[in-house]
Image (tube, helix red, strand yellow):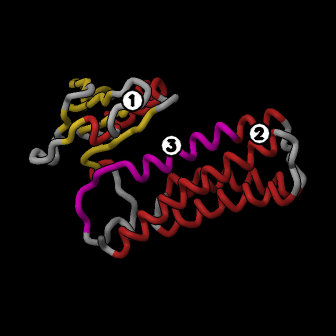
């Protein structure tokens, strides 16, 4: 693996750990522990995600993490009280942050010599975008898909973990996709951009329990 790609992959692995730390810390705060140690651990998790995202010029991730970090800094300084409503909103922000991390990672883009270190991919660079949904299926379908279609992303795979299937969207027109295919257990997937590549659903979801 190329050196920069290896570093990028490590960053996303660290994001998974930092998101878990962030969620655990906020849950601890919900239980009443708002000590400086707990708040600082939560702040550092968001700050670390922001720093790594900046190194790879993942601007959407940097922007959201910065807003989250600024709010947490107000909690650290005592100008914002982390009451139930504030913590509930922060937990929702963790879900959004996780979605942005996934969107930054789960895409197949055109080859570029700088490996997208100098600038993040734009819509024209994306060959295939993969959304993994557990509880966010409706949101992904109703809110994100129209945006992807409008951006002319040619193919989107919506991985429905609860339904054990992948819904493939192709042929964007306006704010919708005109071709939809549901792949279930036993089926195969072949990306438009890579016609020689065939994946089984088990390759994507793992073996059935």
Q: Position of residue 158 (x, y in %)?
A: 35, 33
Tag 3–tag 1 contact (CB < 8 Å) = no
Which label's residue is closer to the chain start, 3 or 2? Answer: 2
Left or right of residue 49, residue 120 in this image = left
- Give neighbour class at mark 1: few <14, some 14-19, many 20+ (Cα, 10 Å): some
Q: Which residues are magenta?
A: 91-112
Closer mark to the observer between disc 3 and disc 1: 1
Question: What residue would you read off at disc 3?
Answer: 99
Helix, strand or loop for disc 3: helix
Q: Position of residue 205 (x, y in %)?
A: 34, 37
Looking at the figure, which quarter contains the N terminus? bottom left
Looking at the figure, which quarter contains the C terminus? top left
Q: Is residue 119 above or below residue 93?
A: below
Left or right of residue 76, residue 88 in this image = left
Q: CA distance from mark 3 to mark 1?
A: 15 Å
In the image, 49 versus 201, the foreground residue is 201
Left or right of residue 182, residue 162 in this image = right
- Residue drawn at (59%, 61%), measured in percent from left and top? 50
Q: Position of residue 91 (x, y in %)?
A: 68, 39
Residue extending farthest to the left is 196
Q: Position of residue 80 (x, y in %)?
A: 86, 47
- Residue drawn at (86%, 49%), measured in percent from left and top? 34
Q: Which mark is residue 160?
A: 1
Question: Can residue 200 be found in the magenta stretch?
Answer: no
In the image, 172 versus 168, the foreground residue is 168
Question: What residue would you read off at disc 2?
Answer: 87
Helix, strand or loop for disc 1: strand
SS majority, magenta: helix
Q: Is residue 142 above or below residue 40?
A: above
Q: CA distance from mark 1 to mark 2?
A: 28 Å
- Residue drawn at (31%, 34%), measured in percent from left and top? 149
């Amino acid at each position: 693996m190329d050196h920069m790609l290896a570093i990028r992959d490590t960053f996303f692995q660290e994001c998974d750990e930092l998101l878990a730390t962030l969620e655990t810390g906020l849950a601890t705060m919900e239980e009443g522990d708002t000590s400086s140690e707990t708040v600082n651990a939560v702040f550092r998790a968001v700050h670390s995600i922001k720093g790594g995202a900046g190194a790879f010029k993942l601007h959407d991730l940097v922007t959201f993490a910065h807003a989250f970090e600024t709010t947490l800094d107000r909690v650290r300084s005592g100008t914002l009280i982390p009451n139930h409503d504030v913590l509930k909103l922060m937990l929702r922000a963790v879900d959004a942050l996780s979605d942005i991390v996934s969107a930054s990672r789960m895409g197949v883009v055109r080859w570029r010599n700088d490996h997208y270190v100098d600038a993040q991919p734009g819509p024209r660079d994306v060959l295939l975008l993969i959304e993994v949904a557990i509880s966010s299926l409706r949101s992904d379908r109703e809110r994100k898909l129209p945006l992807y279609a409008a951006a002319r992303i040619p193919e989107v795979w919506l991985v429905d973990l609860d339904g054990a299937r992948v819904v493939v969207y192709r042929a964007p027109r306006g704010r919708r996709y005109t071709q939809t295919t549901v792949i279930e257990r036993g089926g195969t997937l072949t990306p438009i951009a890579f016609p020689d590549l065939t994946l089984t659903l088990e390759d994507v979801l793992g073996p059935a329990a």
